Amino acid sequence: MALVAARGTLLRAGVRLGTEAAACGRNGTRRSASHRVLVEPDAAAGIATIKFKNPPVNSLTLEFLTELIICLEKLENDKTFRGVILTSNSPGIFSAGLDLREMCGKNPAHYAEYWRAVQELWLKLYVSNMILVAAINGASPAGGCLMSLSCDYRVLADNPRYKVGLNETLLGIVAPFWFRDTLVNTIGHRASERALQLGLLFPPAEALQVGMVDQVVPEDQVHSTALSVITQWLAIPDHARQLTKSMMRKATTDNLIKQREADIQNFVSFISRDSIQKSLQMYIEKLKQKKS
Ligand SMILES: CC/C=C\C/C=C\CCCC/C=C/C(=O)SCCNC(=O)CCNC(=O)[C@H](O)C(C)(C)COP(=O)(O)OP(=O)(O)OC[C@H]1O[C@@H](n2cnc3c(N)ncnc32)[C@H](O)[C@@H]1OP(=O)(O)O
């Protein structure tokens, strides 16, 4: 049902499914009919690299989310691919997280559609049967960080500008329970409590120390490290690894699935509040002023 909704969004956005499907082809050449998601398949290795290409900052617009969801679903259903590397096509920014403009000045129906797509991406990532490795080659706040936390392994480029974390409180908004759960499952309760309340964005050394990432490597080694990690993980029999992953993660996704509609309603009513709209507008303004 979510895929049908996602396809509806894509069609409204003018993306032709026939050509979009080609973006996830398997014949070893880059196919980029999808505008915002580049897929570099290596069928022989069973690995695909997904590169985010949604300038300027890979923020999760509804169209970008929809393309990502469809792409992941196609890879998931294609038994050729057992592992996926998620990275940015624009080194410097992995993803700026949820698109602020999707959450500002729109109507409740839009907010509901948007939030359903955010939920869907997380569900697809968190319990994917594939091995997912995030090659974090740029800044990765909030929803960008959530994407990497939803992978099985995170490699971060060693650059002090590449901070990662769930900084929602700095925007005057609140990370929902399933963002929290994903963080708690990764770094533990106490560290999450501090990180979430303070909206901490961790530079590489601190991110490694607290467990937000598994490895910090020189910038030019992020992709090769992700590849060698995935190769190690591929040596584990799929059925055993997948059942183990499910055992570790399914309760967390089930928790959202059972209250998915209520979570959408919560989001819509929270984000529609005047005070929240004002906070978001001020934050967008601050980002603009930073430039001048
Ligand atoms: C009770 C609870 C119930 C329910 C839930 C309720 C609440 C909702 C929870 C929602 C969870 C939210 C998750 C999120 O992901 S929110 C988004 C958080 N993201 C950020 O804070 C990142 C902001 N951006 C930055 O810090 C910098 O842009 C970044 C990424 C470090 C890059 O810096 P730089 O290279 O210098 O680029 P600029 O800052 O100049 O930005 C260029 C351009 O992009 C625009 N932009 C940046 N980030 C976003 C974004 N997230 N969305 C949309 N647009 C973005 C920026 O404004 C500039 O635009 P311009 O037009 O000026 O060129």
Image (spheres, grey):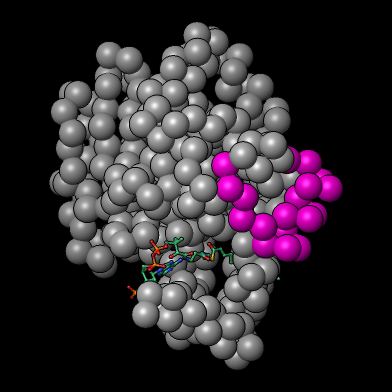
Marks counted in the figure total 0
Q: Which residue is drawn at 32% across and 15% down?
A: 45
Q: Residue at x 58, y 22 (%)?
A: 242
In the displayed structure, 99 sits above or below 232; it is below
Q: Position of residue 188 (x, y in %)?
A: 78, 41
Q: In which quarter of the image is residue 99?
A: bottom left
The answer to which of 194 and 161 lies nearer the viewer is 161
- Residue 128 in sight in this render: no
Q: Position of residue 291 (x, y in %)?
A: 38, 75
* Quadrant of the rendering where the C terminus is positioned: bottom left
Q: Which residue is drawn at 37% across and 57% down?
A: 58
Q: Main secondary structure of the magenta part?
A: helix
Q: What stretch is highlighted in magenta?
A: 185-204
Q: Where is residue 200 in the image (x, y as percent from the top left)?
A: 67, 57
In the displayed structure, 264 sits above or below 17; it is below
The answer to which of 8 and 197 lies nearer the viewer is 197
- Residue 287 in sight in this render: yes
Q: Is residue 113 left or right of residue 208?
A: left
Q: Quadrant of residue 142?
A: bottom right
192 part of magenta stretch: yes
Q: Is residue 155 left or right of residue 71?
A: right
